[in-house]
Amino acid sequence: MYFGGSGTFILIILMIMASVASMKVKSTFNKYHKIRNSRGMTGAQAAEAMLRQNGLTDVRVERVHGYLSDHYDPRAKVIRLSEPVFDNSSVASVSVACHEAGHALQHSEGYVPLKLRTAILPAAQLGSQALWPLFIAGIVLSLPFLINIGILFFTFSVAFQLITLPVEFNASSRALRMMDEYGFLADEENKHAKKVLNAAAMTYVAAAAMAIGQLLRMLLIRGRD
């Protein structure tokens, strides 16, 4: 009786939305990964050029294994690009690489949402791991305070997802503006790049919606207990 009702229905809808967003970003990346950019610039070269144009000499660009595993590590000051992005000269590769370079620029400028996201990350990770053990223990043992602690911890995860939105949107905005300004891509290619980054942004929106839906579901269950 604890896991039924409207809360579960809403969560299922959000899960479907998240799956659709994930499929969309993969299909969009794959589509524009087949289109070579007119300059023949690889993802690694684009990221390095964007850093160089902005005077960032202390950030490295490295290749990592995986598919769409690209990320910027602010602690090590490293942009890690997956093999399909690092070595490839497609429109999609340059778009993703410049997006990650956008995060490096945020870091160098002390962009506040990025600082907040980095600061809250440990608490967010703890919140996602602690939610269900505490929540289920509170229900089984009839200890409401355990349920409340689980929900409190999970709010950090929700906050992390919400703070992620401006961080990702801003990185994409920087990438699109600078790819155009520095001539990394031609006019039509810039339009393709926008589609790639917009599709990627939807995965973050879906993740935030999922986190909020999960939190609301927990609050509904607590209200019934």
Image (tube, rainbow, N blue to C red):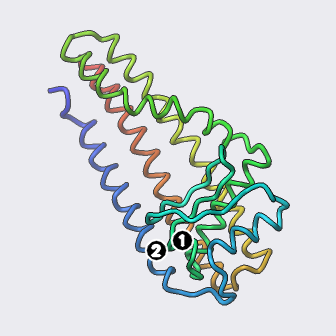
Image coordinates of residue 181 in percent, x first then y, are 79, 74
For the view shown, which residue lies furthest in the left direction? 1
Q: Is residue 203 above or below residue 217?
A: below
The Cα atoms of the two marked residues, 1 and 2, are separated by 6 Å
**Residue 129 image offset from top left, x and y in percent:** 37, 31
Q: Which mark is residue 196?
A: 1
First in sequence, mark 1 or 2: give its number. 2
Q: Amino acid at mark 2?
A: Thr
Q: Position of residue 33 (x, y in %)?
A: 50, 80
**Which quadrant of the rendered structure holds the N terminus?**
top left
Residue 28, numbered circle: 2
What SS does tag 1 mark? helix
Instruction: Judge from the rendering whether residue 50 lies leftward or rightward of residue 195; answer left or right.
Output: right
In the rendering, at what x and y percent does residue 221 appear?
27, 25
Q: Residues within 10 Å of mark 1 (few under 14, many from 20)?
A: many
The residue drawn where x is 72% and y is 73% is 179
Camera-nearest residue between 219 and 78: 78
- Residues at circles 1 and 2 in contact by the CB criterion of under 8 Å: yes
Under circle 2, the secondary element is helix
